[in-house]
Image (cartoon, rainbow, N blue to C red):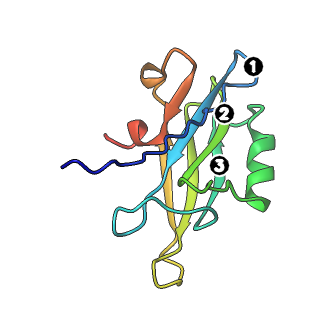
Amino acid sequence: GDAAVDITVGTRSIPLPSAPDKYVIIINAADEFGDLAGAGSWRIRITDVWPRGLPGVDLVQLTRQTPITLDANGQATFEIAKETTAFALSITPQLAAGADGATEIIRVTVDPTVANEYDQIYLADLLTE
């Protein structure tokens, strides 16, 4: 119709890797209804990185104690070394009713061919196998 509609558009940037030998992994999370997860509504931790002995081992020790946190838009990022062939994540979603969902451990194989020109990889692109 003839009614005016105000639209607010915001931008946000996805971080670039801190060094050329790293990828940024991007997680976009949704709840069990498909709605974007809010800040802090999922607990995500890296539990392992392969092959052993990579610099990412420091990341594993850190994230076991400190979860990777989602922002208000349901997005989180973390870095891995480009030599990483796989990593494991522990994911515990908070359900809409406020209770924790079942914790899931997933092993993710890193496929460098899905990285974009900025060395960013969406976790969803690694889970579509």
Which residue position is annotated with label 3? 48
> What residue is at 67 percent from the left and 56 percent from the top?
69
- Sequence order check: which comes first, mark 1 or mark 3? 1
User: Percent x, y for residue 1?
Assistant: 18, 49
Residue 4 higher or lower than 12, as above or below: below
Disc 1 crowd rating (10 Å Cα; few below 14, some 14-19, many 20+) is: few
Say the numbered circle drawn on residue 107. none
The answer to which of 56 and 95 lies nearer the viewer is 95
Q: Nearer the viewer, mark 2 or mark 3?
A: 2
Q: Secondary structure at mark 1?
A: loop
> What residue is at 45 percent from the left and 78 percent from the top?
96
Which residue position is annotated with label 2? 80
Answer left or right for 4 relative to 108.
left
- Sequence order check: which comes first, mark 1 or mark 2? 1
How many numbered marks are there?
3
- Sequence order check: which comes first, mark 2 or mark 3? 3
Q: Secondary structure at mark 2?
A: strand
Which residue position is annotated with label 1? 19
Task: Give the farthest residue toward the left.
Answer: 1
Residue 23 higher or lower than 32, as above or below: above
Q: Amino acid at mark 2?
A: Ile
User: Percent x, y for residue 32?
Assistant: 37, 69
Answer left or right for 18 relative to 116.
right
Answer left or right for 66 relative to 46.
right
Disc 3 crowd rating (10 Å Cα; few below 14, some 14-19, many 20+) is: many
Q: Quadrant of the C terminus?
A: top left
Q: Amino acid at mark 3?
A: Asp
